[in-house]
Image (tube, grey):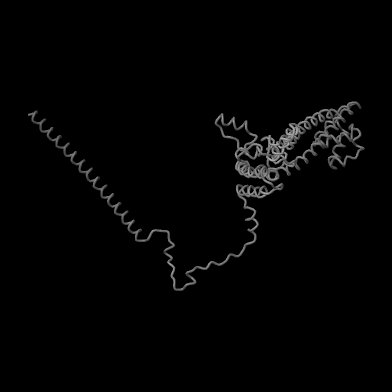
Amino acid sequence: ELVTAAPPAEMRSMAIGLAHSLSRYKLKFSPDKVDTMIVQAIGLLDDLDKELNTYAMRLKEWYGWHFPEMGKIVPDNLMYAKTIQKMGVRTKCKGLDLSDILAEEVEAELKDAAEISMGTEVSEEDVANILMLCEQVVSLSEYRAQLWDYLKNRMNAIAPNLSVMVGELVGARLIAHAGSLMNLAKQPASTVQILGAEKALFRALKAKHDTPKYGLIYHASLVGQAQPKNKGKISRVLAAKCALSIRVDALGESSTATIGIDSRLKVEDRLRQLEGRAPVEAADAAPAARPQPAVVMAADTDKGRGYSVAADSTLAPSGKKKKGAKDEADDDAAAAKKAKKAKKAAKEGEGEKKRKRDGEGGSGGKDGEKKKK
């Protein structure tokens, strides 16, 4: 209504453009700060790990029929697949050079085992299918390494302080579990500490047992370095520092680690303190003993002033001591006197009772004699 000359179609496009501009301004949209990529990347990384484990297990079972001893000699999945790709059947192992894949000792052991292997023979078609599975394992492993590098770069760009505190992998899992970096920044330190252990938390609350001390943060390197008895304390300290680092990453303007480095040093100092080791500064300063300045008393400089040594004593004055001792002696004497009186009264009571009994016995004897007469 304010711009009358513009047709309705232009007004509609202007309104849409204005709405988009306001939304971008409110969100402060930046391609470098999109945490959705981290959520998707960490999810894909977990899926790749599951698929790789499944494929590698299937490959070892399949090729194990032909060369069963190789599984224990070459435990790494990627090296196993590359060795099969280069070797094919075990009979070709002796004449091949596998130094670019395996270590010298492992290569010699593998060649010796290939000569005396108890495995069955396989056809060319079987070997062709096994080699195709090897290609899948190798390609997935290479893609996983590439994805891991991408995830590290994104984490260092979006959450540098959190990456310094707990590492890129644990930081990405925390962001993915919360949904976004901003949602994670809204959580208190106690929630960050047990994030990922919700089932155990509610089960403990329902059964009135002890609640869990850590969730995803347990996999951080700082918690792993701590002794079992100190893991709960370190996870609490680390969660408090992580909460500050997350808020700086989400709301701060800097794209490099600022508060994270100092916070990590403080957590490491706390870990040394719990383990009974000296902090870094004290350990560095301990070997070099610095000369201490001499302390000069004011009374030593002024000869006219005297210094009362008795004023430094924290004990009661001697007069009060004597008085207290005297009071105690009087109390003891009074108590002894009272006990003596009670003893004397008891003796008198017993004597009086005895006399009464004797008197009654004498009168009874006289009455008996009178009756006899």
Q: In which quarter of the image is the N terminus?
A: top right
Q: In which quarter of the image is the C terminus?
A: top left
Given residues 4 and 205, the one toward you in this image is: 4
Classify residue 219 as left or right of residue 53. left
Classify residue 105 as left or right of residue 298. right
Quarter of the figure with residue 45: top right
In percent of width and height, residue 84 lies at 87, 34
In percent of width and height, residue 256 lies at 71, 48
- Considering every residue shown, the one lying at the far left of the view is 373
- Considering every residue shown, the one lying at the far front of the view is 5
Whether residue 73 appears in this view of the structure is no
In percent of width and height, residue 303 lies at 46, 73
Whether residue 316 appears in this view of the structure is yes
Q: Which residue is drawn at 20% across and 43% down?
A: 348
In percent of width and height, residue 162 lies at 68, 43
Q: Residue at x 24, y 45 (%)?
A: 342
Q: Is 257 situated above or below 121?
A: below
